[in-house]
Image (spheres, grey):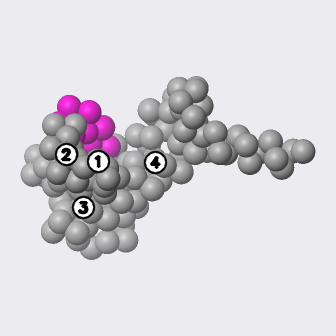
Amino acid sequence: MNLILHLLIDAGVIFGLAYFMPQIDVKNFGTALLIAVLLGLLNFVLGWIIRFPLNLVTFFLLTGLVRIVVTAILLKLIDSFLDSFTIRGFWPALVIALVVAVVGSLIDRQAPTPEMVESGYVVIRQVMASLQLA
């Protein structure tokens, strides 16, 4: 369920940013959904291959920034494959990657999976909620 939510929200973010930014052109919402699916697949398959050397160079101190830059690179790669999706320049791709990361983080905070709760990712939220109830 969380994966479907992320894909729909990512497609909405991409489609919405295409409406507001003239450097981005997306044909329709179906194309935006295809872009979101391709972005997820490429991040899973190629993203770690690109991120690992960059994280080694930065001593794993800038992993969030590296993830955003790699996502922007993958968006430019998707742009080269699809005719119905165009990004003019690297900065708009970086804006899309940043907004997708922020929105994804907000979604994860509002609807955490059981794995996130077990790992301690959302412990602060639970503590704050219990303090408000007391």
Circle 3 sits on which residue?
A: 93
| Residue density around tag 1, few if under 14, some if 14–19, many if 20 or more, within 10 Å | some
Q: CA distance from mark 2 to mark 4?
A: 25 Å
Image quadrant in which you'd find residue 24: bottom left
Q: Is residue 17 magenta?
A: no
Marks 2 and 4: which is nearer the front?
Answer: 2
Q: Earlier in the sequence, mark 3 or mark 4?
A: 3
Between residues 22 and 46, which one lies in front from this camera angle? 46
Give the left or right position of residue 115, taking residue 61 as reference. right
Where disc 2 sits, the SS reads: helix
Q: Position of residue 93 (x, y in %)?
A: 24, 61
Residue 60 circle label = 1
Q: On the image, which quarter does residue 25 sit in? A: bottom left
Q: Which residues are magenta?
A: 35-47
| Distance (Cα) linking label 3 and label 4 | 16 Å
Residue closest to the eye, 116 or 119? 119
Q: Is residue 106 above or below residue 87?
A: above
Q: Nearer the viewer, mark 1 or mark 4?
A: 1
Q: Nearer the viewer, mark 2 or mark 3?
A: 2
Please report the residue visible at 53 percent of the width from the left and 30 percent of the height from the top. Answer: 119
Residue located beneath label 4 in the image: 104
Q: Which residue position is annotated with label 2? A: 56
Which labelled disc corresponds to residue 37? none
C-alpha span from label 2 to label 1: 6 Å
Label 1 vs 4, first from the N-terminus? 1
